[in-house]
Amino acid sequence: MTTFFTADSHFGHAGVLRMSRRPFDTISEHDEMLVAAWNAVVGPRDEVWHLGDFAMGSSPERCADLFRRLRGRKFLVRGNHDKPRVTSLAWHEQHDLVSRKVDGTRVIMCHYPMRAWPGAWRGSIQLFGHTHGMLPDTSQSCDVGVDRWSYAPVTLGQIRERLAATPDLPEERRLGQAEDDGEDA
């Protein structure tokens, strides 16, 4: 079993094509490609944490159809567009904020990026969506939205590679280190 992360699929939301400059002619083409990208990497026994904004503008029936077609055991961290058509789906769990240990790493998941989070000083990482790639990652926080990851869910290994290539510390740690450095002077 592999654990995957994703966010901001916005199934059914025609406006996201323009807003996020997604390269699709129609929302139907977009939705079908996202389903194909998801199922190309996720197996039936894998877990997928969707960090919000699963669908917007889709009927409850369309949401249910798309949800059924996606492989894996699905978990939802609710986003600002996740209305009853999304929250009524058969998610394994639903949260607003969740902390889990994945492959030995404490992972804090929220739809929104956080400036500080539990365990940041002890190596935990924070995964988020919502910003559609507009905010830079840090060495411990990462946007897992489809706009940043070729429209497919990603593994913690892929995320760790990106974090390792990002030298910027989270704000809380950066400012705390600067304060500590000032005390030594």
Image: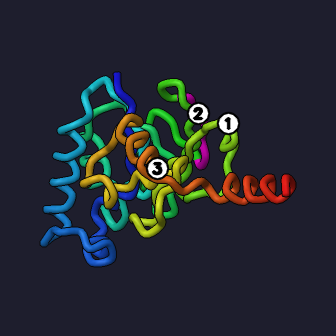
Overall secondary structure of the magenta section: strand
The answer to which of marks 1 and 3 sits earlier in the sequence is: 3
Q: Please state the extent of the stretch shown in magenta in the rendering.
A: 96-101
How busy is the neighbourhood of tag 3: few (under 14 within 10 Å), some, or many (20 plus)?
many
Q: Quadrant of residue 68?
A: top left
Residue identifier under label 3: 51
User: Quadrant where the N terminus lies?
Assistant: top left
Q: Residue at x 30, y 68 (%)?
A: 13
Q: Give the amino acid at mark 3.
A: Leu
The answer to which of marks 1 and 2 sits earlier in the sequence is: 2
Measured along the vertical axis of the image, is residue 146 above or below residue 36?
below
Q: Give the amino acid at mark 2.
A: Arg
Q: Give the amino acid at mark 1.
A: Arg
Residue identifier under label 2: 106
Quick one: SS at disc 2?
Answer: strand
Quick one: SS at disc 3?
Answer: loop
Could you tell me how far apart the alpha carbons at marks 2 and 3 are, in whole angstroms? 16 Å
Q: Residue at x 43, y 40 (%)?
A: 160
Could you tell me how far apart the alpha carbons at marks 1 and 2 are, in whole angstroms? 9 Å
Q: Quadrant of residue 159?
A: top left
Question: Which is nearer the eye, 95 or 18?
Answer: 18
Question: Which is nearer the eye, 61 or 174?
Answer: 174
The percent position of residue 171, horizontal first and vertical second, equals 65, 59
Residue identifier under label 1: 122
The percent position of residue 6, horizontal first and vertical second, equals 38, 48
The answer to which of marks 2 and 3 sits earlier in the sequence is: 3
The type of colouring in the image is rainbow
Residue 79 falls left or right of residue 20: right
